[in-house]
């Protein structure tokens, strides 16, 4: 009596199955990546929304917006410190010694992550960028951040007075006299004025690239603000006196030089999230008209703003 022989897969059949599985995985991965990026974009939008609520709560309490940065009377700080009580970081604010510069204890501890400004607060970071970036480019270690205030269509030092003021800046270009705007000053309309936007941070903590170094008030650096000199994600390099030679990221080109500025930038495809004066979050295309973008950068420039 003959025995039935069970037929197995041939080598060719096995290779065909493997090839089909590989094709399916190749088709699936982009969809998974797109879904993850969509989730990260939503989270980034929510992060910026929290900054917007904090700005409005600060204004309700003080009847003005926080200054971007000051070095008046040696009190060197940026807007982040004043915003702490409004982003659920009151304990940090209560321990911070505002009579000292940001780089002295307990505000900062040299070569250590124990200083108050070294605390990695989730609200600092865009989820599509580095989620725990810190500055270790010098002994004064501190957290970096991805959300910056609007400095308008100006460079630093300022070449000439702009046609309209941004919500944040220096009065008479004096770092000791920071601008503290009120929403009543937004004659262009709060819905037509930028408060904050995203920027990109260096991928390495020790890189001496000051973009995102938003605890550093130094007026010689572009570290806590973005400018509307160029459109978002511009291929033109940001101009700064402190850029890392090891940072070769094509998404954040940089060059040294005077008349410094930094563009709004993100790792989201096609544009950046921005916070408007009315608290709305918009996604602005990298291809936005430059004049429209610059118009959004002023609170009292009387520009005509079209769709964006």
Image (cartoon, grey):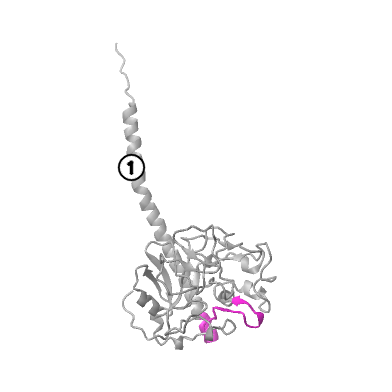
Residue 118 versus residue 210: which sits nearer the camera? 210
Residue 127 versus residue 151: which sits nearer the camera? 151
Q: Which residue lies furthest to the right in this view?
A: 105
- Left or right, 56 with reference to 301: right
Residue 187: which quarter of the image?
bottom left
Q: Is mark 1 on a helix, strand or loop?
A: helix
Q: Vertical placement of 59 versus 248: above or below?
A: below
- Left or right, 110 with reference to 237: right
Give the position of the C terminus as an image quadrant. Answer: bottom left
Q: Label 1: how many residues lie within 10 Å, few (<14), some (14-19) or many (20+)? A: few
Where is residue 219? Give x, y as percent: 57, 76
Where is residue 14? Give x, y as percent: 34, 31
Task: Check if residue 230 falls in the magenta segment.
Answer: no
Residue found 31% across the figure and 78% down from its top: 306
* Range covered by the magenta-colored residues: 57-77
Residue 281 showing in the rendered view: yes
Residue tagged by mark 1? Answer: 23
Residue 25 versus residue 287: which sits nearer the camera? 287
Task: Check if residue 58 falls in the magenta segment.
Answer: yes
Total label count? Answer: 1
Residue found 50% across the figure and 78% down from its top: 55
Where is residue 68? Give x, y as percent: 54, 78
Residue 57 versus residue 190: which sits nearer the camera? 190
């Amino acid at each position: 009596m003959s025995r039935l022989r069970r037929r197995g897969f041939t080598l060719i059949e096995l290779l065909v199955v493997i090839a089909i599985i590989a094709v399916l995985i190749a088709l699936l991965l982009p969809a998974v990546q797109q879904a993850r990026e969509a989730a990260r974009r939503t989270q980034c939008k929510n992060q910026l929304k929290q900054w917007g609520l904090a700005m409005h709560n600060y204004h309700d309490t003080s009847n003005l917006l926080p200054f971007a940065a000051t070095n008046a009377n040696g009190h060197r700080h940026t807007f982040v410190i004043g915003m702490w009580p409004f982003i659920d970081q009151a304990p940090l604010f209560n321990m911070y010694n505002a009579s000292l510069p940001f780089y002295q204890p307990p505000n900062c501890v040299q070569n250590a992550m124990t200083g108050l400004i070294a605390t990695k607060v989730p609200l600092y970071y865009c989820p599509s960028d580095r989620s725990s970036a810190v500055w270790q480019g010098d002994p004064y270690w501190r957290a970096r951040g991805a959300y910056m205030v609007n400095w308008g269509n100006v460079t630093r030092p300022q070449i000439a007075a702009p046609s309209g003021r941004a919500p944040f800046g220096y009065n008479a270009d004096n770092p000791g006299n920071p601008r503290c705007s009120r929403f009543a000053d937004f004659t262009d309309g709060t819905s037509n004025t930028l408060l904050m936007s995203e920027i990109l941070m260096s991928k390495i903590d020790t890189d001496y690239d000051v973009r995102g170094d938003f605890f550093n008030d130094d007026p010689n650096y572009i570290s806590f603000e973005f400018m509307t000199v160029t459109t978002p994600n511009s291929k033109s390099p940001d101009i700064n006196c402190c850029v890392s030679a090891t940072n070769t990221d094509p998404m954040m080109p940089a060059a040294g030089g005077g008349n410094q500025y930094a563009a709004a930038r993100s790792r989201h495809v096609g544009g950046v999230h921005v916070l408007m004066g009315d608290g709305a979050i918009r996604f602005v295309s990298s291809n936005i008209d430059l004049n429209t973008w610059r118009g959004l950068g002023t609170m009292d420039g009387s520009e005509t703003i079209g769709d964006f």
